[in-house]
Image (cartoon, rainbow, N blue to C red):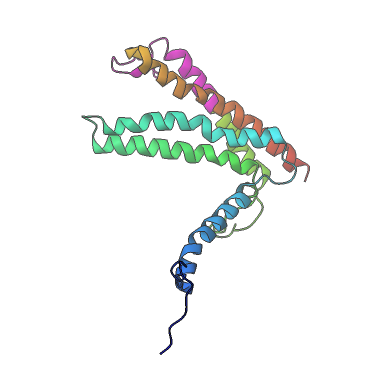
Amino acid sequence: MTRTARAPGAGPPPAVTTGTEESATAGAPVVTGRLRTAWRAAHAPVPGVPRWARLAAYAVPFTVLPSSLWRLPLVFRDGVGFGERAYIVSLSVVSELVAFTAVGLVAAWGERFPRWIPGLRGRTVPTPVAVIPAALGAVVLTALWTYAFVTVPAGVTLGGEPIPADFPTQAGGWEAAIFYLCYLPLLLWGPLLAAVTYAYHQRRRKH
């Protein structure tokens, strides 16, 4: 047998790596990169979308996010039942999903039906099918949150009844301030959606 000569003071021989180890190391970034690329491609604005409409559409989910996050700690309060906890979590998740549909008014996926819808998969969405629900939603959201921010500071619920003593605005101080800071952005939800809907209608009408 012969020994491989090594210069004095030289470090240990380099470790031998296998193809399996290299692929395992490189696999995660590749997958992540593909997902990121697919996400950007799906939500990138289509040609003809004004910059202001793109910014407005992307801003809509962020107007809902503070209030959604504010509600989540309520799940861990004592005395909150399972049904109420499920409602709070569901309300936050559904609110974000509904708000995110505004992005569809500037992205390609808002102009074609999803492939999982039988009979409509891949077909172009008629302009009224997108514009009418979005416009109605903008009107309802604007009226709802404007009315809420008129009645709540006055100590009245949306139903016209006195606000309960344990409501966050009744506590005063930081608790009330944080509540208002988290819910104030909701005043922008309706107007932003209306602006994006108008841009969508104008763009689709030209094609």
Write the residue at 47% across / 79% down.
5
Picture quadrant of residue 67:
top left
Q: Is residue 79 above or below residue 103?
A: above
Q: Can the viewer see residue 4 in this picture? A: yes
Q: Where residue 159 appears, x then y in whole percent?
A: 39, 19
Q: Residue furthest top?
A: 154
Taking the magenta stretch, the answer to whether it contains residue 144 is yes
Write the residue at 57% across / 51% down.
39
Q: Residue furthest bottom?
A: 1
What stretch of residues is rendered in magenta?
141-168
Q: Residue furthest left?
A: 79
Taking the magenta stretch, the answer to whether it contains residue 154 is yes
Q: Where residue 200 appears, x then y in whole percent?
A: 68, 39
Picture quadrant of residue 172:
top left
Q: Nearer the viewer, residue 11 or 136?
A: 11
Q: Is residue 154 above or below residue 182?
A: above
Q: Nearer the viewer, residue 142 or 27?
A: 27
Q: Is residue 8 above or below residue 38?
A: below
Q: How many marks?
A: 0
85 sits to left or right of 60: left
Q: Residue furthest right?
A: 206
Q: Nearer the viewer, residue 166 or 16?
A: 16
Q: Where residue 119 appears, x then y in whole percent?
A: 58, 60
Q: Is residue 14 above or below residue 113?
A: below
In which quadrant will I find the N terminus?
Answer: bottom left
Q: Where residue 45 appears, x then y in whole percent?
A: 67, 44
